Amino acid sequence: MLPNLDKTDLIELLHKMLLVRRWEERLIRLAEEGPSFGHYHVYIGQETIGIPALAALRPTDLIFPTHRNHGYLLGRDANPGRLMAEILGKQTGLNGGKAGTLHASAPELGIPHTSAIVGGIVPIAAGAALAAQLKGSDQISVALFGDGATEEGATFEALNIASLWRVPVIFLCENNTEEALGAAAGGYPKSVTAATDLGSIARSVGVPAVVVDGTDTGAVFTAISEAAERARASGGPTFVEARVVRWPGSNPLWPQLPSGETELSFAWEPEAAPEQLLRWYRDQDGLLRYLREMLSASLLTKDEAVKIDSEVRSQVEAAVHFARNSAYPTPDSAYLDVFARQS
Amino acid sequence: MEISAIDVDLQQSSRQPADRELTYAEALVEAIVKLMKEDPDFLIIGSYLLGLGPMRTLFDAVRNEYPKRVLDPPTAEIGFTGFGIGAAINGLHVLVDLSTASFIFEAFPQVVNEAANASYMSGGRLAVPIIFHFLHGLRGGGAAQHSHSPQAMLWNTPGLQIMMPSSPADVSGLLPAAIRSGNPTVFVDHSKLMAIRGYVPALPKEIPLGVADIKRSGKDVTIVATSYSVQQALSACEALASEGIDTELVDPRTVVPLDRQTILESVAKTGRLVVVDETHRSCGIASEIAAIVSEEILDALKVPIIRVTVPDVPVPFSPVLENELDTTPERIAAAVRTQMTRKQISRP
């Protein structure tokens, strides 16, 4: 199902989802080429959660991401070159090279703080909502986290307090554990919780919880719109669990491109995809599903899609060029910014 | 305490108002009420700032006057501390009270890994104006799980300011400065300070962070002490004065930022240093101050430095055992006497 938006907005969503996909595919290649920029996580396969979620919010609403933050930063129009530069540790990076991929943020875009500690961002996002509530503004806040964060005490405490104080926050849990290999198989960890229904943790403290198919942009858009409306109407928090199958490239401990880059033609010709990824491209990749839905609804032609993709690819190449050609920070800047304001 | 009566008195009088003698707890509550009044964005989460002693009812003045800005959270330290950080990120000026210092361990990830890092990771573009308040140290019967002094661990975390007021005037002046600094600040407090009396300016003035206070001037031995141990050291100084030993007592008041100059100047003058504090001996506040003096002005020392600290054992319950570990005036005085009588370092 497509989100209830007009054609221009729907095309803009495609543009942003493709930007995230191409930018991160390029990032994986950069990592493979070296020099290493350390461990990192990609958002590929989850674009259909973050991008429609952002479209359901106002630009003044606050977003608090995790280590899997690239999609939200690009979705909120962070400069792709400056984000890339941050990951390469350059002076021109969003945070002057102090954050890297794990901690990149953009306060001026309503992404004030990113926590790469599992569960760490959840109470902070809810606290930002408390401030909005006390100031009497209609701003809301979104806590982003994965299924693994429901294993953490911080998440439970934040749900309980948010419920007691009815703060205007959305707990958006991106559950990407389905078909994940997990640590025992030598892959990236998957969540291990005795609760088979993650929303039951939220409901136990009075937070309403819904589950949506994270590859269904319309369902995500509707769930976030409803949660935002409830929060703005002083109805308190909502827990939204968006489920996706983990992208096979995010299954190993370090991201890989299991079959090279995504071909848009797999959307209409999935049998052309490499056999081991046929099921992924045909049934599980939300981005290609969105593209198929746009084509079926005659909101877009294949040629137009290819044209958008080619624009995005140029944008990504420009970002890589910018990041690579940016200077490293001067060593003495290591001593700056310990405090926001020197007392 | 009649805070409103003080205001009326000031309004009706054009003469310079006289300083007043307040208890530490009264001065702290007065400072909080003033912040509440002047700053509509000031929020308090947790309300056991004054401990569990008889002084605690003074806080009712704040709660009754500003019920919407004094929030009593569930027993969920990592949760409500994170709430405070988020509220500060979104424009409020927040004081989170963790009550007993040992409870900050439940909130450590938020304090040391979120608040302390937030400005730095953002490249200096994010301010987190928050105060983390707790009551540290030997409180009488707190035993191993309720007697911690975590300020040394926190000093080992870049990105946190640390204030340790030891008198009514200092708490009155440091609290508003910490709030206005815009930076995460640990407010190291002590339940044994609550009943201490002292003069507070009639018109309380901010005390800049990073300015030490010489609580007593003297020429023979420098004592550097923090928090409640300043009060213990003051008692020791009186006893020593009657023996003819003239001590100088330096209270850094904040260790981040630290007024190194005042400490170094005092030690350069006396040539003898005793450092007192209630953190455990290894890697404690006293260790760092001793290290700074050794690095900077070793030549000025006539005798080796002595640290008076809580030994490296958990704090026991029995009063006799707790007292054995305390940085009592007697232990401080004994250390100072040693500094006066021991053989001086011979230098070629």
Image: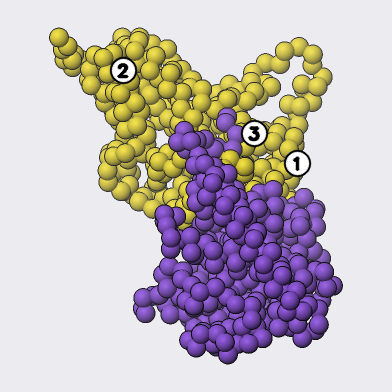
Chain colours: A purple, B yellow
Q: Work out how far the residue at label 2 is from the one at label 1, CA to CA, in angstroms.
A: 47 Å
Residue labelled with disc 2: B297
Q: Is residue A171 visible?
A: no
Q: Which residue is outermost to the bottom?
A: A271
A77 or A228: which is nearer to us? A77
Amino acid type at mark 2: Ile
Host chain of mark 1? B
The location of residue B148, given as percent across then percent down, is: 40, 46
Mark 3, Cα crowd under 10 Å, few <14 / some 14-19 / many 20+, is: some
> Seen in the image, is A154 located left or right of residue B139?
right
Q: Work out how far the residue at label 2 is from the one at label 3, CA to CA, in angstroms.
A: 34 Å
Q: Is residue B127 visible?
A: yes
Residue labelled with disc 3: B180
Co-location on one chain, circles 3 and 1: yes
Disc with the residue nearer the chain's start (2 vs 3): 3
Closer mark to the observer between disc 2 and disc 3: 2
Amino acid type at mark 3: Arg
| Vertical position of residue A156 compared to residue B156: above or below | below
B126 or A198: which is nearer to us? B126
Q: Quadrant of the N terminus of chain A?
A: bottom right
Q: Quadrant of the C terminus of chain A?
A: top right
* Label 3: element kind: helix
Instruction: Say which residue appears at 67% left-offset and 69% top-offset.
Output: A309
Instruction: Say which residue appears at 55% left-offset and 81% top-offset.
Output: A245
| Vertical position of residue A74 compared to residue A286: above or below | above
Residue labelled with disc 1: B40
